[in-house]
Amino acid sequence: MRAPDRVDLRLLVPALAAWAVTVGALGVPVPVRVGCALACLLLGGVVLASRSPAHRPIAHRPTARHDDTRHQAMRRQAVRGSSGTRPASWRSGLAALLGLSCLTSAACLLASATHDTRSRVGGVVELAEQRASVTGTAVVLGEPVLVRGRGSDEPAVMLRVRLTRTTVRGQVRRLHAPVVVRSSDPAWRDLRWHDEIRVAGTLAPGRPHEPTVAVLRPRGPPEVGERGPLLAAADHMRSRLREATDHLPADARGLVPALVIGDPSATPPDLTDDMLVTGMSHLSAVSGSNVAIVLAAVLGACRLAGCPRRARPWVAALALAWFVVLARPEPSVVRAATMGLVALLGMSASRRGAGAPALSAAVVVLLLLDPWLARSYGFALSTLATLGLLLFVRPWARAINARLPRRLHVVGPAVAIPVAAHLACAPVVVLLQGSVSTVSVLANLVAAPLVAPTTVAGVLTALVALLSPSLASWPAWLAGLPALGIARVARVSADVPGGSVDWPDGTPGALLLAGLTVLGLLAAPYLGHRARAAPVLACCVVLVLASAAVPRRVLVDVPDDWVMAACDVGQGDALVLATGPGRAVLVDVGPDPAAVDSCLSRLGVRRLDAVVLTHLHADHVGGLTGALDDRPTQRLLVSPVRDPEDADREVRAEARRRRIAVSEVVAGDRLSLGPVTGSVWWPARRITEGSVPNNASLVLRLRIGEVDVLLLGDIEREAGHAILLALRRDPVMSAAVADVDVLKVAHHGSANVDEDLMAAVAAPDALISVGADNDYGHPAPPLLALLARTGTRVWRTDVDGLLVIVPDGDGAAVGSLP
């Protein structure tokens, strides 16, 4: 009978100790870290030097008593150990683990101190504090990222570089300083990884407890040096892959480069959101699973080609190195490559015992190379996913296959892999999403068979594109078809009612989920035994628990009596107020024409009595064409503050082209659009503090049938305080606040609010229109805490999807349509 697999996890103890120590050490002064490292070295050396020797094997002497069985020898050895003549081996093992933990912790402490010291060589921190102007050379560390500037529609470029040499006041300094560059110059968007550039600009202090030590605000475009032949070849291969996939549908055009070369720039934003909600975001970028697939394909090709067994690891290593260069060896890709190699090693039939030690070594080595990985969610997810595969895949797959015919034994690993990865990563995922996906395992299970053909065909497309771009369109379709399947799974899963369950946020929620997961794994054998003994009772319990987990207000379709809806348009606002069958008033149009058009179609809106643009930022006016196309529109209401001016000109030009009347409204104006009535509370004046456009947002107090709502636009603290003072002066406004059923929270849940105003306008339900995984940290935890203190139920479009309000007696009820 085959012995069960045993995974030796002892070496994980030193790795986890080093990880925990590194997390706590980052940001601590370098001398303190060095002192702690020396103390750990001393303690580890003392423990290892003084540890008791373990059992020595009993020498087998060739005597006449050759007929002793192994069982008798083991009994004699056990009696000998119990007599006290030899110390227990577990004590020696515990001492060894303690000593190794001290040594690995000391190594990581010294590595982080060295990394920090090296980053500050040349006095870059002091130069940043002095706001010094510098010129010098730098190496690009990552791909440019476009972000929307605060209070501006102009996108800015953020880029990590390493300053290698600077000239300050005629003095040349050698540096090794990681800094972040922020510029609105479009020339910075074309830089690539490892470009050597010459730059001039002003240094500013960076954020504390960040891997970059300063911020560089450049003057003008960079001067780019020549690329090396290896990097140029990788760039050529990347561009050829993008060209080969240009003719594919949008979802496939985004996913294939994301899986193969780690380029998610072409992935549709709504698909990215759907994959995040369903726990499939790891499939939209280079991950350990992609690396394992590429390595497995290379090894299989070597075997088919008759490559000698000893040469196969070298071929696989070369293929892995090229794949990393192709996908850009940023920390995330290096981490994925390492964990993919470990997972493949641990799940192979001949090396399964090496998986856990390899994972431990990989964690320590990665922390030595880049100590800031210790605080990376991606590093935690990769490590936990790999650990889940090592621990659970083989026994779970064997247990599943034991109940299936041999020809279906492929089902066991296919089911065990996504389940193991999901359970291992769930406590960290809840920190990022604030919810638990109920469809993640099923979605990953369905999509998993499509990842390998997409990745392998994508790599094949890149190779063919180098030789003949015209022929690359055929393998591109081989990669695109399964990629479309992955996208379809994500989109369908994201629309499943009750697909995610709200969960306590922060560390307590993660610890609670981790505890429940461990408890469930430990109790699973007993529960399985009881379920087999009483199957009817077990089915009843499962049905009761499933019905309790489904949110009570998740809808399956748009109700006929809806009066207001908050569209899920990403990081932006689009509120729909019903005025009759197929008619509505639209307040803001979101950033994306397709998103707002889809939402209006889903709500059955064919005509707009009015479009209200609270202010002119792109996340509120960018989708205007999508709202107006094929929908007759009578009026366009705007704020009197025409800032930004470019957006104002575009909006008014679009209105003229469609012959729509534009009207400016101010505080005190009355609105009457069928069943939608009310008044404008703001703006009463122009506020120059903070963001001028945000503080010029239209604030509307409306009544829609029997439901009272207050829409705060994107006002910030300054405008909020002015409205609060008006509430105190005006008894009519003060009385109107008390009747509000639903509050639309300002600025996507920003913390830049007047807290007294938020307390004064508290309502039973609050809507936050916000994009998933946005760069601004919206909604801000302080704002959510403030709403919780007022007893307000919070509904978020990034979590709950399309929000629909219906009358409910004397108030309103909010439902969600994922």
Image (spheres, rainbow, N blue to C red):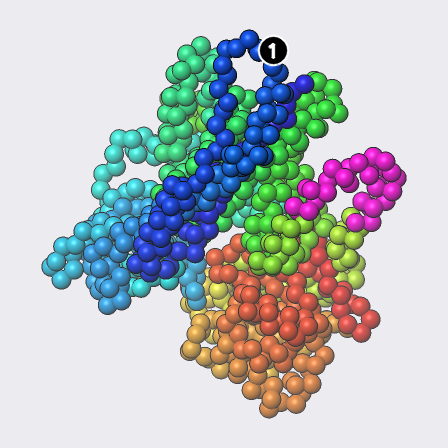
Q: Within the image, what quadrant is residue 744 found in? A: bottom right
Q: Among all residues in the image, which is located at the extreme top? A: 64
Q: Is residue 520 magenta?
A: yes
Label 1 is placed on what type of residue?
Asp
Q: Is residue 538 above or below residue 721?
A: above
Q: Is residue 543 above or below residue 56?
A: below
Residues rendered magenta in the picture? 517-545
Foreground residue, 533 or 400?
533
Q: Is residue 737 magenta?
A: no
Q: Which residue is mark 1?
A: 67
Where is residue 155 drawn, in percent x and y?
Answer: 40, 57
Where is residue 681 drawn, in percent x and y?
Answer: 59, 80
Q: Is label 1 in a helix, a strand or a loop?
A: loop
Where is residue 674 drawn, in percent x and y?
Answer: 72, 71
Instruction: Using residue 17 as the reference point, say whether residue 791 is left or right of it.
Output: right
Residue 596 in sight in this render: no
| Residue drawn where x is 43% and y is 14% of the image | 309
Foreground residue, 107 or 621?
107
Residue 95 in sight in this render: yes
